[in-house]
Every structure is written in C-alpha cells, then in structure tokens.
Image (cartoon, rainbow, N blue to C red):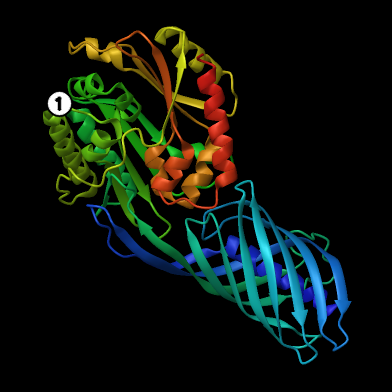
Amino acid sequence: MQCFRFTRFLAAGVLAIAVGSMTAAGSSPVSATGGSHGSESASFDITGYRCESEVTHEWVRPNGTKVVRTVQTGFTEASIALMTGALTVETTLVLRPGGDGWVRGRWTLEPTASTGMLRGTVRGSFTEPEVTELTSTGHGFRALRGIKISMTTTSPAAGTTDTCMSDLTFAGSGTASYREARDPVGAVVAESAKPFTDSVGDLAAAIDANPNLVLAKTVDHQAAAASRGLVLPPTTELFFGNAAIGTPLMQSAQTAGIDLPVKILVWEDLFGVVRVSYNASSYLQSRHRIEGADAQLNTLGNALAGLASVATGTTVDPVFDAGTVRRGAGLVTIETDRSADDAFAAIVAALEAAPPVNVAFVAEHDVAAATVPLELRPTKLVVFGNPSLGTVLMQTDQSIALDLPQKILVHTDADGQTFITYNDPHFVAQRHGVRGQDELLDTLSGALANFARAGT
C-alpha cells in the first residue's frame, strides 16, 4: 500500500541522516579564556537503507484522513554524527484526502542509546506522497539541535532479495545545526592552527623534551572507541606531571590528587576544527581549596599555557581565572578502615577483574613525592574507563574527554583515616553541557560506587 511505502521513506529520512557524509562546514572562533564557541551548522549529502518495516496500526477517519503507525529498523554505516549501529524509528503519519498532512515520530540509535524526536510535513497524494521537510532533534549527535532534509526515494529493483541493503534506497541533502557550545567552567580552550596529528605530536615532543616533566600516559579515545565498534572523531589526551609542583598542591589538599597528573586534551570536531583544552589553576584551587601554594599554581598555569601554545601553533596566554567551583564540587568520598595500600590494591584488583573496564594507569603520588624529595601521606590514583560508555558521552560533546577516563583516589589523612574519592558523573556531564544521558550517567555512578566499595 502506498501509505506504507511513504512511512518507509520517512523513517529512512532519519536513517539516511545517520549515514550521511558532510560536504561543507563552518565554525566560529573559540575563546581561550572561556565562553561561547558559537553555534555551528553543516551541509551534507545523505544515503541510506531500510532493513524492516511494520505497520502496527492503520485506520481511516470519517472525513477520509488516513492514519498509519509504523515501526522501522535500519542500519547505519557512517554519519554526520559519527555514530554507527541499529536505528529504530517509530512514526505516525496523518495524510488528508487532498494529499497533505504531517508525520511525527521518535528515533533511537543503538548501541549508543541516543534518542530524539522527528517531525515532517507531507505533500502529495495517497498514491505518491512525499516529504517536503523533515526535522529531527535529540540527544547525542554532539549536542545536535536540528536537522532539515529533502529526500527522493527509489523503489527496489524487481527480484530484490536483500531487504536490508537493497530493498529501498534513499538519497538527498540537508543541513544540520548544533547548539551553541560553551567552554566548561574552569577550563581553558584554544583553537589550534595545526592539524590534529601535528598538534598531538608537537605537544608530546614538548613534554618529552622538558626534563622537569614526566609523560604518564597518552590516551587515544578514538582508538578506544573503535575497540568497541564505536566511532569517535580524533580525541587524544596526554597526562603528565612534575612531582615538585604537584606534591605541594596535595600537601595542602590531598583530594587534588584526583586531578593530578595534569592533562591536556586535543580533539578535532565534526567540522574539522582542532581544539586544545586543560584545567586552569583556578579550577584546581577552588575545587580542592588549595592554600599556601600560589607559586606552584602560577608555575603550573604558565607551563600549561606554554604547552598549549606549542600544540596550537598560536599564543595562548596564561589564564589564572577561567572560573571557579565550590569546594569539593563533584567529589564523592567514602571512608574505609583499611590502609591506603590495601584499599588501593583491592580497587585495582576489582577493576582488572571487570572485563568491560580498561585500567589506563596508576599514579602513586606519595611514591613520586619521595623522589623529589618531599613528604606526602599515602595518596594513590587509578585511572580507568569503559569505552562503551565513555564514548557515548564524548559523542555528545567531545570536551567531556577532559574529565575522562574515570578516576578513583585513595588517600590517608593526618589522623590516619583512609578515604576513597571519585568524580560524580552527573557533575562532569553538567560541567561540559552533556544532556539527555541520565540513564547512562546513573549506570556510571553505580559502577563507580561499586568499585569504590571494593576498597572498603
């Protein structure tokens, strides 16, 4: 029936967006001192395939208006949002006797669990309906605000048996717009004049060439995503430190160890813009209420700006006030009767026994302090992640990689009491403007609580 054919076409409109290739892009400058990146939009070509279609309900009103509810499933290979997986679209089509009408629906993409609404206007007839405009909004898709497309469709060739890839082919073009991006509170963000690979390579070389710095770990989030069958734009994070600078910060406030060693994030967005970001010293000072270490904080701020300048090929001025947060913002802490060594060993063992989790590295801050030499009470950090979950957050907004992978800090205070501290995923998401991922954030929160309790 032709109405049924139309609903197949409509669902593929969203499906085709998910397999689109971007042909043009635009971006506004990025502020290195915080603030707005500006809204962005892109034009793209689209093609797509339908796998299955089922009419779940159909009726004709007394005035001749036809209503058809349909469930579609499809397959994505690539997309403007750089996501892959199985797409499900549920739509309701209302078509009047004169040939005009509207359609509403919801789409869901797995395994990323992104979801959103769609709507469109209809023009044509019962025998040859067509979509004049389709708009889709939803969570994920790097803060997607809306997509508008115009489509054409071709019927399957006679004798076609491959219903998933050849039953119906869709082609068209459209534009996608993204909400205005804002720098995370307390972060410095600068736009690079270099390609992504050069930005990362030059930054790593500068760290290696500095005898006062130790490169702890390079985390390639894009490669981690690919290991789970997910797609992410280039996103790499470098962790490095200087015990002579970091130890006084932790002597003042041990929880600062969860944000040390410091890191610089380099990422290329969907529009080809390469950015570099790091936490400003004001963020560390306010979050952990660091006192009596102004010299170290200033040195840190100058060093990070210098490295960001090398990475970007531009001049990034030191930023000592990129915004502050309340003391202990986003920190979850529990007590344990165990020693720091025993609690830390138990947590690391629990992480290594959880197959979805990858342990990136451990940093025993107290051991590093002794090499300077400085004294520091037991303070130990493990950095780990589950790319299947973290990638979805980065697909929504790449800047959140600055607070990924996950971290658990074990530390003993002056009274000999041991504490276990980790970051609240909801705080991290709010800091980076990630929306619509509450279920995933709840899952992360539960997993972090379980791993922390392993140390008790």
Question: Which x, y percent locates residue 162?
Answer: 79, 59
Going by the numbered disc 1, the residue's amino acid type is Gly
Q: Is residue 341 above or below residue 240?
A: above
Question: Which x, y percent locates residue 331?
Answer: 40, 31
Q: Nearer the viewer, residue 60 or 194?
A: 60
Question: Which x, y percent locates residue 48?
Answer: 65, 64
Which residue lies at the image location 55% right of the left edge and 74% below the top edge?
A: 148
Question: Which x, y percent locates residue 447?
Answer: 56, 29
Which residue lies at the image location 65% right of the left edge and 63% below the top edge?
A: 15
Q: Looking at this view, name the residue that lies furthest to the left.
A: 295
Does the image show residue 24?
no
Q: Which residue is mark 1?
A: 292
Does the image show residue 401?
yes
Q: Nearer the viewer, residue 430 or 179?
A: 430
Q: Is residue 379 above or below residue 304?
A: above
Helix, strand or loop at label 1? It is: loop
Occupied quadrant, residue 187: top left
Q: Which quadrant, please, contains the N terminus?
A: bottom right
Disc 1 residue crowd, few under 14, some 14–19, many 20+, Cα 10 Å: few
